[in-house]
Image: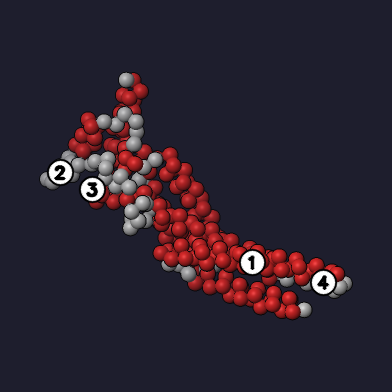
């Protein structure tokens, strides 16, 4: 049947598109690849409907029903790539230092610690699944990208307790003064933390070295606020 030949041609073309995903690892192209995979998924959904139509015609004509085993296999194979590239887009739209609306470029006082921590945990779980999937598929480029994303998440995870500590209710100028005193101990050039700074600016101050001090002073601020 003409429909079957057209189906097979389209299925083979979609298969080639999915195979190309094995070679891609440039995280800067995440938005493009998410669109690309969405297009592949739409084509697969149409193929699935076409398969049902072809099988219905075969049944009406008492022909043997064609199984098309490649279709469900391709549909299954594309899912790990879809999850990986959606993760890449999610991570680099929230953590990428070059995006002005990313967490790393927003003033620390405007960040929501609960929202960030919840979203971060979701991204971490997805990343772990993606790493496992790419290792099982033995595809070098996507596996490397999953590892790179894991590294980005590992690095950002160190900022979460700082974001939470600096957004504690009750943090006042006197507490910031104590934090800055800790930061500037033994330094010739004074650098002062301000809540209007973003993570990029705080990173240049090597602020992560003082996480324990910041958390301790933040805890004091929180307790003082509760007792007011």
SS category of the residue bearing label 4: helix
Quadrant of res 65: bottom right
Residue 210, percent across and down? Answer: 27, 41
In primary-sequence order, the first of circles 2 and 4 is: 4
SS category of the residue bearing label 2: loop
In primary-sequence order, the first of circles 2 and 1 is: 1
150 vs 224: above or below = below
In primary-sequence order, the first of circles 3 and 1 is: 1
Q: Quadrant of the C terminus?
A: top left
Task: Assess whether mark 4 and mark 1 are in contact (beta carbons under 8 angstroms).
Answer: no
Which residue is disc 1 drawn over?
Answer: 44
Numbered badge on residue 205: 3
- Of residue 76 and residue 48, the one placed in the foreground of this image is 48
In primary-sequence order, the first of circles 1 and 4 is: 1
Q: Residue furthest right?
A: 62
- Of residue 188 and residue 200, the one placed in the foreground of this image is 200
Q: Nearer the viewer, mark 2 or mark 4?
A: 4
Quadrant of res 76: bottom right
Residue at screen point 23% across, 32% down? 173
Residue at screen point 71% across, 79% down? 5
Task: Assess whether mark 1 and mark 2 are in contact (beta carbons under 8 angstroms).
Answer: no
Q: Quadrant of the N terminus?
A: bottom right
Q: Crowding near pointer 2: few (<14 within 10 Å), some, many (20+)?
A: few
- On screen, residue 85 versus residue 109, left or right, reads right
Which residue is disc 2 drawn over?
Answer: 190
Which residue is disc 4 drawn over?
Answer: 58
161 vs 82: above or below = above
SS category of the residue bearing label 1: helix
Q: CA distance from mark 3 to mark 4?
A: 71 Å
Q: CA distance from mark 2 to mark 3?
A: 10 Å
- On screen, residue 181 versus residue 123, left or right, reads left
């Amino acid at each position: 049947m003409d429909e079957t030949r057209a189906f097979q041609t389209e299925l083979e073309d979609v298969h080639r598109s999915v195979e190309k995903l094995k070679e891609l690892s440039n995280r800067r192209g995440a938005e493009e690849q998410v669109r690309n995979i969405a297009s592949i998924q739409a084509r697969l959904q149409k193929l699935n409907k076409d398969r049902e139509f072809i099988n219905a015609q075969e049944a009406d004509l008492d022909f043997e029903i064609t199984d098309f085993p490649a279709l469900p296999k391709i549909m299954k194979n594309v899912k790990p790539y879809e999850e990986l590239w959606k993760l890449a887009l999610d991570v680099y739209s929230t953590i990428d230092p070059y995006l002005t609306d990313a967490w790393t470029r927003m003033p620390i006082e405007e960040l929501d610690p609960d929202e960030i921590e919840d979203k971060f945990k979701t991204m971490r779980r997805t990343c772990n699944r993606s790493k496992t999937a790419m290792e099982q598929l033995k595809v070098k480029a996507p596996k490397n990208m999953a590892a790179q994303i894991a590294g980005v998440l590992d690095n950002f995870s160190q900022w979460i307790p700082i974001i939470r500590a600096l957004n504690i209710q009750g943090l006042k100028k006197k507490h910031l003064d104590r934090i800055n005193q800790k930061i500037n101990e033994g330094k010739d050039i004074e650098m002062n933390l301000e809540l209007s700074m973003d993570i990029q600016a705080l990173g240049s101050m090597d602020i992560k070295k003082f996480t324990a001090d910041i958390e301790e002073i933040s805890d004091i601020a929180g307790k003082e606020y509760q007792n007011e």
